[in-house]
Image (spheres, rainbow, N blue to C red):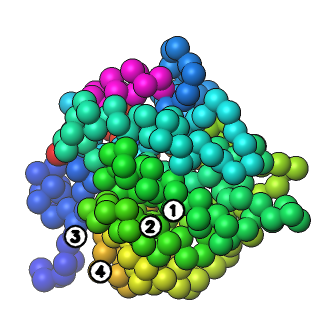
Amino acid sequence: MDEITHRPRRLRRTPALRRLVSETSVTTADLVAPLFVAEGIDAPRPIDSLPGHAQHTLDSLVAEAGRLLGLGITSVVLFGVPSDKDADGSGASDPDGIVQVALRRLAHEYGDALVRIPDLCLDEYTDHGHCGVLTGEGTVDNDATLVRYQEAAVAQAAAGANLVAPSGMMDGQVGAIRSALDAAGHLDVGILAYSAKYASALYGPFRDAVDVEIVGGGDRRAYQQDPANRREALLEVALDVEQGADIVMVKPAVTYLDVIADVAAAVDVPVAAYHVSGEYSMIKAAAERGWIDGTATAVEQLTAVKRAGADLILTYFAGELAPILDA
Ligand code: PBG
């Protein structure tokens, strides 16, 4: 071979060289840990489809957040599992609803050391399992749902949220929530918007985790995005940024790397990606059978998500990987 031919392998020879020229790294600072807190239980309940995760009691939630902080994971996204559900999803905005109580506990225990991000949606709280309130015909009523999101946002902010994370994919949700937060004096509470959220089959384990079943075997295709569409994500993101989103998110992550890259190129706000329950469970299940190295696969996937352009990643691997990642 000619002397001046480029030989890329030179830079791959040793770990120190590879580290020097690495374009992307996943660090604990990039990761947000999803946590579940359930009302009316006395002991944490392991979630079968999300090995290593549980529905927490208030006490075990506080302990888990403390453990994560010790590992350098300083942000959590919170999901509530109420003991009672109703048509309006009242628990989502009740000051004594499980997530609001949990936020107050976490704020009291950890203050500004912990970034508290409640998921803002109705599906965990509605008896029909949809992300909004229903019309007489049983479809999700967009604008009536916005009012419920406003109430939930104000309740979450009052309880100690740093960012609220609307995940219901209603049109106009970011603007409605921003104006309600401002009107209630919560100017410092930001919005992490699930902007490009696809109607994915990969949310299955999550629905077990929060005991959600959609009435009549229904689905969310009438409000979440069609996996076939790429350009539409840019419209969703542009609308959210225009309405005041502080961070925009793409969800799921690995099957939507093209969308993450497009969004990262299009916006000036931070871009988040949600490595969802099914993405976690697939790795766990294959690793359990000895078919893949779970840790290596997880790191490779999260690296790909960052390489595509995500600044931060919500992932069930946060706590598990923290000890082997840089800060
Ligand atoms: C809705 C919500 C969902 C997830 C996060 N927020 C479920 C859904 O839209 O059906 C999924 C997260 C995951 O699968 O890890 N509140």
Distance from disc 2 to disc 1, alpha carbons, whole Å, reads: 6 Å
Mark 2 residue type:
Ala
Viewer-nearest residue: 133 or 51: 133
Residue 180's mark?
2
| Magenta stretch in the rendered image | 56-69
Residue 164 placement: quadrant = bottom left
Mark 1 residue type:
Gln
Residue at label 1?
A: 150
Q: Callout 1: 10 Å neighbours few (<14), some, many (20+)?
A: many
Mark 4 residue type:
Asp
Residue 229, visible in the rendered structure: yes
Distance from disc 3 to disc 4, alpha carbons, whole Å, reads: 33 Å
The kind of secondary structure element at disc 3 is: helix
**Outermost residue toward the front?**
184
Residue 8's mark?
3
Residue at 28%, 47% (x, y): give it.
115
Magenta span main SS: helix
Residue 268's mark?
4
Q: Is residue 44 above or below residue 129?
A: above
Q: Callout 3: 10 Å neighbours few (<14), some, many (20+)?
A: few
Residue at 38%, 76% (x, y): give it.
244
Mark 3 residue type:
Pro
